Image (tube, rainbow, N blue to C red):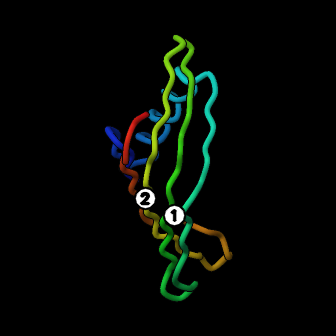
């Protein structure tokens, strides 16, 4: 997974990133647009979407960011969806 300013290469990286979110973000909301999905269970799915992310920190800082995300999603033998790759990039900050 790759978030702006924070690549995640392990479970420990994810746990550190998520702990930082919990410790600093008081509330947040996501608005999804431009969602496109192609592919199949055999060839994996490609997912592309735009997200408007708004958040407020415990220090009263606010965020309003538009983020584009690309995912590769696989389906395992138990029919669970697994995110094989994830990349997010900030399109703009408002």
Q: How far separated are the C-alphas under marks 1 and 2?
A: 7 Å
Q: Nearer the viewer, residue 67 or 4?
A: 67
Mark 2 surroundings: few (<14), some (14-19) or many (≥20) residues within 10 A? some
Q: Position of residue 14 (x, y in %)?
A: 46, 42
Looking at the picture, does residue 48 appear above or below residue 18? below
Residue at label 1?
83
Reply above or below: 62 against 76.
above
| Residue situated furthest top in the rendering | 59
Are discs 1 and 2 less than 8 Å apart at CB? yes
**Residue 5 placement, left or right of 54:** left
Q: Give the residue number, with chain letter if any, for mark 2.
A: 86
Residue 91 spot, x, y in % from top left: 37, 48
Q: Residue at x 48, y 74 (%)?
A: 46
Q: Position of residue 12 (x, y in %)?
A: 44, 40
Q: Quadrant of residue 33?
A: bottom right
**Quarter of the rendering occupied by the C terminus:** top left
Q: Is residue 37 left or right of residue 89?
A: right
Provide the secondary structure element on which disc 1 rests: strand
């Amino acid at each position: 997974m790759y978030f702006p300013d924070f690549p995640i290469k392990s479970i420990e990286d994810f746990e550190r990133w998520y702990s930082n979110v919990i410790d600093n973000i008081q509330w947040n909301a996501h608005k999804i647009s431009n969602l496109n999905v192609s592919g199949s269970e055999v060839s994996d799915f490609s997912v592309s979407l735009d997200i408007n992310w708004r958040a407020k920190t415990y220090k009263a800082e606010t965020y309003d960011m538009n983020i584009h995300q690309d995912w590769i999603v696989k389906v395992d033998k138990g029919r669970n969806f697994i995110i094989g790759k994830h990349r997010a990039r900030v399109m703009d900050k408002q």
